[in-house]
Amino acid sequence: MRIVASDTGGALLDGDYTPIGLIATAAVLVEKPYRTASMSIVKYSDPFSYDMSGRQAVKDEALLAMKLARKTKPDVVHIDSTLGGIEIRKLDDVTIDALRISDRGKAVWHDLRKDLQPLAKRLWEDTGIEMVAIGKESVAVRIAEIFAGIYTARWAVEYARKNKRTSVGLPRYMSVELRPGKIYGESLDPREGGLFGEIEAETEGIGWELYPNPLVRTFMVLEVWRE
Amino acid sequence: MRIVASDTGGALLDGDYTPIGLIATAAVLVEKPYRTASMSIVKYSDPFSYDMSGRQAVKDEALLAMKLARKTKPDVVHIDSTLGGIEIRKLDDVTIDALRISDRGKAVWHDLRKDLQPLAKRLWEDTGIEMVAIGKESVAVRIAEIFAGIYTARWAVEYARKNKRTSVGLPRYMSVELRPGKIYGESLDPREGGLFGEIEAETEGIGWELYPNPLVRTFMVLEVWRE
Amino acid sequence: MRIVASDTGGALLDGDYTPIGLIATAAVLVEKPYRTASMSIVKYSDPFSYDMSGRQAVKDEALLAMKLARKTKPDVVHIDSTLGGIEIRKLDDVTIDALRISDRGKAVWHDLRKDLQPLAKRLWEDTGIEMVAIGKESVAVRIAEIFAGIYTARWAVEYARKNKRTSVGLPRYMSVELRPGKIYGESLDPREGGLFGEIEAETEGIGWELYPNPLVRTFMVLEVWRE
């Protein structure tokens, strides 16, 4: 099974470890044995002017996943929304009202589906590929989350090169490591069976430290600075 | 404390990682230091014609645990049903209605207790051993689950020997390993303090691969084939 | 960020692994990189006559944290109560009624705040330090919990020296190790990013064994005896 999935993660933090805005949306192609991505792309947001409501993230994720799907022709596209694996192209207002989600979630999806349903329908008509709202149950979505964290680390490295230093919060229970010429990241939850990722990055001349976010258990902070 | 517990787990998977039916019910005797079983027995089901409602599993588990309990005389028998540790022999209709479980759960137990209550009562009258519905809180039930996964791996090996290859899904966050003459399995959750198991098995001439089930995070797939 | 936090944990167990009473309240000073305490103090309770309702624990925790805070002047004090990070000094009856917690929780806090609000207010007026009810989300509270477990191990060692042997239950998913001249403890959850602690203790002439509590998954039992 070849799966394209996407997720948004990684936050710029202020001095009190409070998130200012999200940084990276990653889309990944995941193939057997489903432990890492065989291809990944990223779309960076501006964390200084970020829509924290979550709607922008879902749209960005759907668009980026679609872009990678058209290129790589997977069997299915996984979106990080926990609607029980329903196909996005079938999300009309009646179906949304029948979902077992909160009223607030329904309001968000009545709005979102105006953008996403036509896109998912077109993808399906053009390629036969379904886009499903499966959420964190999907290992591919979790791998996308880990890559969002790794790309966030690269953003932080580039930001520190220009602005001396910065701190970012990684997605849940994952670590990153700056290595010569690349950034490696992995899940800190061994129950997930060894999920990891790696991207190329210029890491020379950059110092870094990784430690637990004291205010949000199981989330790590990456601090990077120009040496 | 000597505990007998039982659980059902391991599923035959189709090509899309969808479960077709469950494979193994295991009963285990667990003694201090409570990390593995000092004795285990198995009852295999036919995954191609499996009652997925769960009632068959609970009955199989109770009967298999009772069989091992009559042989090994433990202090208590643990059943994988989360009814707060209530004694099965006391489960009359009034008590079931008073439980804090869903209406569906009550309907199932009104039905189940017709079979199980007399058996639990007889076990208690004959031996003084209580059978309690404690669920996954019990380490012994979790060890039974791990053994169900290990026996599932042996089933897969034997199936592949006859039918060339197969894929099975293991119980939650556990891994297995085919070793010469045996199959070893262990919990992937270090918070459980190192739970594991091992059984004898002919593993020669069998190839295998273990990887995350892409559709169900924290569950592993075991693929085995005749070499 | 310098944080003082406190928590109560560790239970004396009877022969059936049932808790008799809690043992240790620990307060810790946690500083970057937030993996252990740079200072810790303990208040032992009498587990043989322990108020299991939880109110005594919260009061002990607040008083002990305050004591350490007056000495070490942290930026903030974290209390193990999940009220969304609200400041204790602002907890009047109207605010408590507006919290999204159970009616039972509200009754407890209407009672507790009579003692705690004036103390938190005085701490804030004297030092500018806020005491907030953040709960287990705080890494500092989790480190306090780990230290409560380590101090519980020391209590068990001293108890065994006088009374030959004893068994204690540690806080959730943590292990301890008796080493020459000290006791080391650490989280068993790697998602927490490597939390640990160490205190001095006379461990000579003491045997010990650590194993899973068979009745409460992810909790460990420490058994110690005079050799």
Image (spheres, coloured by chain):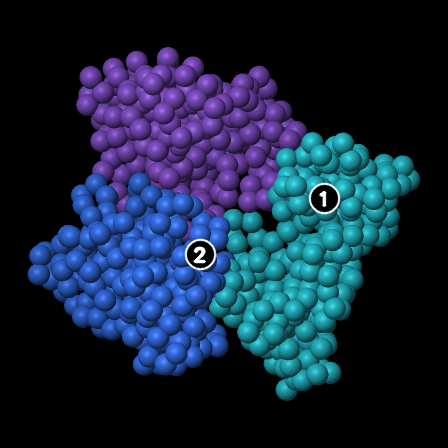
Chain colours: A blue, B cyan, C purple
Q: From the image, state whether disc 2 or disc 1 is nearer to you.
A: 2
Position of C209 with respect to A212 (left or right) is: right
Q: Nearer the viewer, residue A101 or C178?
A: A101
Q: Nearer the viewer, residue C129 or B56?
A: B56
Report which residue position mark 1 lands on: B107
Please identify the quadrant where the C terminus of chain B is shown: bottom right
- The correct choice, above or below, for A75 with respect to C126 in the image is below
Q: Residue at x 23, y 47 (%)?
A: A19
Across and down, in percent, residue A208 comes to 21, 57
Chain ID for label 1?
A: B
Instruction: List the single residue furthest toward the bottom.
Output: B227
Across and down, in percent, residue A189 comes to 44, 56
Looking at the rendered structure, the secondary structure element under dot 2 is helix
Q: Which mark is residue A73?
A: none
Packing grade of label 2 (10 A; few <14, some 14-19, many >=20) is: few
Chain ID for label 2?
A: A
Q: Amino acid at mark 1?
A: Ala
Q: Which mark is residue A94?
A: 2
Q: Amino acid at mark 2?
A: Val
Q: Residue at x 78, y 52 (%)?
A: B59
Q: Nearer the viewer, residue B179 or A223?
A: A223
Across and down, in percent, residue C38 comes to 30, 36
- The correct choice, above or below, for B42 with respect to C98 in the image is below
Looking at the rendered structure, the secondary structure element under dot 1 is helix
Q: Nearer the viewer, residue C25 or C160?
A: C25
Q: Residue at x 36, y 76 (%)?
A: A123
State the image quarter where residue C77 is shown. top left
